[in-house]
Amino acid sequence: LSNIIMCLVSAFILVSYEMFARDAIQPGGFFAPLKNLLGDFAIINAVLAILNLIPIPPLDGAAVMSGFLPRSWGEKYQELIMPFGFIILLGLLYTGALNWIGKLSYSLVQFFALCTSLILKPFV
């Protein structure tokens, strides 16, 4: 949840800058890299939020998954997957099976930016 909140806040600041202060900061000036930093910060936090929700035991999604399953199933899931979770995660990373996370995180940042621009539009 904290990664989603940080992604939302950075997207809000970035869109606010674009709508209200675009002319205040010079393109080659001292504060110009902050725009790139905010965009990268939003993407990184979106990637971390989505990655942590994958239900593989070293990640937080495994605990969420176990919480939604009946107690006996959750315990069995943790018991069977826990020893191999890191190996499964490395295999998914190695095979490129997690490439969708980048596209989804970019879409999440775009969604937050769109919502922010719709909220701030009456104030422009």
Image: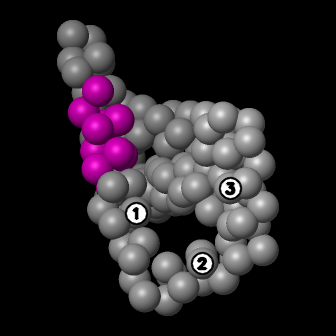
**Residue 42 falls inside the magenta stretch:** no
Q: Is residue 119 left or right of residue 95?
A: left
- Inter-mark Cα distance, 2 to 3: 14 Å
- Inter-mark Cα distance, 1 to 3: 24 Å
Q: Quadrant of the N terminus?
A: top right
Looking at the picture, which amino acid does disc 3 mark? Tyr
Q: Which mark is residue 88?
A: 2
Circle nearer the N terminus (1, 3): 3
Looking at the picture, which amino acid does disc 2 mark? Ile
Instruction: Please give the residue where the numbered disc 1 appears in the rendered image.
Output: 101
Q: Secondary structure at mark 2?
A: helix
- Inter-mark Cα distance, 1 to 2: 16 Å
Instruction: Please give the residue where the numbered disc 3 appears in the rendered image.
Output: 77
> Which region of the structure is painted magenta?
106-115
Q: Is residue 23 left or right of residue 8?
A: left
Q: Secondary structure at mark 1?
A: helix
